Image (cartoon, helix red, strand yellow):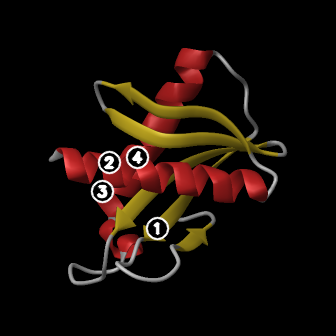
């Protein structure tokens, strides 16, 4: 991944975190990594633990950001959520997987689309 792609991804994650905290969620962790992969954002939405995947694009030439998450990624996010809970030794009643797509056009406003419960 190039530095430009990393910068765009980091920007998208900041935009997503701002959007989600604006909805009343609390960020618990960012860019949590283990051998099995990475979770972009871990948040609390009242009593629900939210694992959030963020996809950021400059345009839709290669598809909308939300189209980039396929079934295999959803399965990996489930495994990662369990590993995060285990590592943090927290008790949760519910885990929800969310997806945030961030579209950063050359001109105009950044567009944010949030999908709750992708699995």
Q: CA distance from mark 1 to mark 4?
A: 11 Å
> Which x, y percent locates residue 75?
38, 51
**Label at residue 102:** 1
> Can you identify the residue that label 3 sits on?
72
The mark nearer the N terminus, 1 or 2, is: 2
The residue that appears at 66% across and 59% down in the rendered structure is 19
Of marks 1 and 4, which one's residue comes earlier in the chain? Answer: 4
The answer to which quarter of the image holds residue 105 is bottom left
Q: Residue at x 44, y 39 (%)?
A: 39
Q: Nearer the viewer, residue 93 or 111?
A: 111
Q: Earlier in the sequence, mark 3 or mark 4?
A: 4
Going from N to C along the chain, the mark reached first, 1 or 3, is 3
| Rendered view: 97 above or below 33 | below
Residues at marks 1 and 2, CA–CA distance in whole angstroms: 13 Å
Query: Tag on residue 10?
Result: 4
Decide: marks 2, 4 in contact (CB < 8 A)? Answer: yes
Numbered disc 2: secondary structure? helix
């Amino acid at each position: 991944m190039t530095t430009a792609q990393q910068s765009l991804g980091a920007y998208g994650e900041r935009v997503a975190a701002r959007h989600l905290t604006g909805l009343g969620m609390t960020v618990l962790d960012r860019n949590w990594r283990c051998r099995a992969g990475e979770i972009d954002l871990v948040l609390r939405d009242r009593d629900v633990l939210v694992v959030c995947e963020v996809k950021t694009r400059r345009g839709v030439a290669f598809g909308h950001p939300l189209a980039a998450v396929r079934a295999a990624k959803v399965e990996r996010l489930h495994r990662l959520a369990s590993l995060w809970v285990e590592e943090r030794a927290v008790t949760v009643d519910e885990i929800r997987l969310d997806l945030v797509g961030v579209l950063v056009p050359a001109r105009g406003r950044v567009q944010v689309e949030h999908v709750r419960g992708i699995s």
